Amino acid sequence: MERTQISILALSIALMSLAACGGGREDAAPNQSAPTVAEGKTVPDAGAGKASPGKPMAPISMSYEVVGNPIIGAPVLINVTVNSSQGPVKVLYSIPDASALSFQQGQVERLELTDPTVGGSQQLSVIPQREGRLFVNVSAEVQTPNGPMIRSMAIPLKVGAAPADASSNGELKKGPDGETVISMPAQPDN
């Protein structure tokens, strides 16, 4: 008798779990994760076209564009655009690893956009200190009727090595045919 009750209890738990997961139906919505910013340039609006049963999203859209190819020791310009349908937006730029990346001198790290409906675009300037994949974090905060809401994104930078110095081992001279050649006279051994 006890074994039968345990079997019925296990079957009941299994059926409840199956019902909570959509019953195994093919028309049930698949479990979707939020898109990440890897190589993309815009943080997609996860709430576009449907209501989310979870935490509400901030009414802020953000995008970026990295200008040029990031190399060690050279300033990298990043165009950041922040839009919102509600009031002023406070924007904060931060670097998670200060030994790998730094702000260029004079770079504003915190600002407030008074009219973000027109598309607040700023230019951010950072200097990579090493090769690899580095990140700049951008957070935007807006006051809503439900209180303050924040939206964040990480801007990835793929930093390469600085180009090798292309110094030549000789001097340019005109040859007998009028052609420019590099003259490299032999050096005596001492």
Image (cartoon, rainbow, N blue to C red):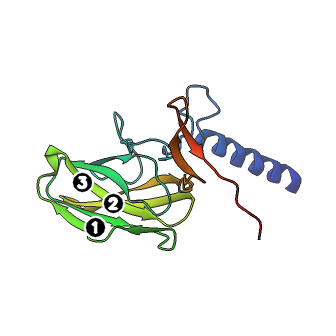
Horizontally, residue 26 falls left or right of residue 11, namely left
Tell me which label, 2 or 1, sits earlier in the chain. Answer: 1
Label 3 packing within 10 angstroms: few (<14), some (14-19), many (20+):
some
Tell me residue 35's x, y (percent). Answer: 48, 43
The residues tagged by marks 2 and 3 sit, at their Cα atoms, a distance apart of 10 Å
Tell me residue 142's x, y (percent). Answer: 22, 59
Instruction: Tell me the element at label 3.
Output: strand
Q: Amino acid at mark 1?
A: Gln
Q: Are marks 1 and 3 in contact (CB under 8 Å)?
A: no
The residues tagged by marks 1 and 3 sit, at their Cα atoms, a distance apart of 11 Å
Label 2 packing within 10 angstroms: few (<14), some (14-19), many (20+):
some
Q: Quadrant of residue 153?
A: bottom left
Residue under pointer 3 = 122
Name, please, the residue furthest toward the front.
Answer: 176
Residue under pointer 2 = 125
Nearest to viewer (mark 1 / mark 3) = 1
Q: Are marks 2 and 1 in contact (CB under 8 Å)?
A: yes
Tell me which label, 1 or 3, sits earlier in the chain. Answer: 1
Nearest to viewer (mark 2 / mark 3) = 2
Instruction: Tell me the element at label 2.
Output: strand
Q: Quadrant of residue 42?
A: top left
The residue shown at (15%, 59%) is 88
Q: Amino acid at mark 3?
A: Gln
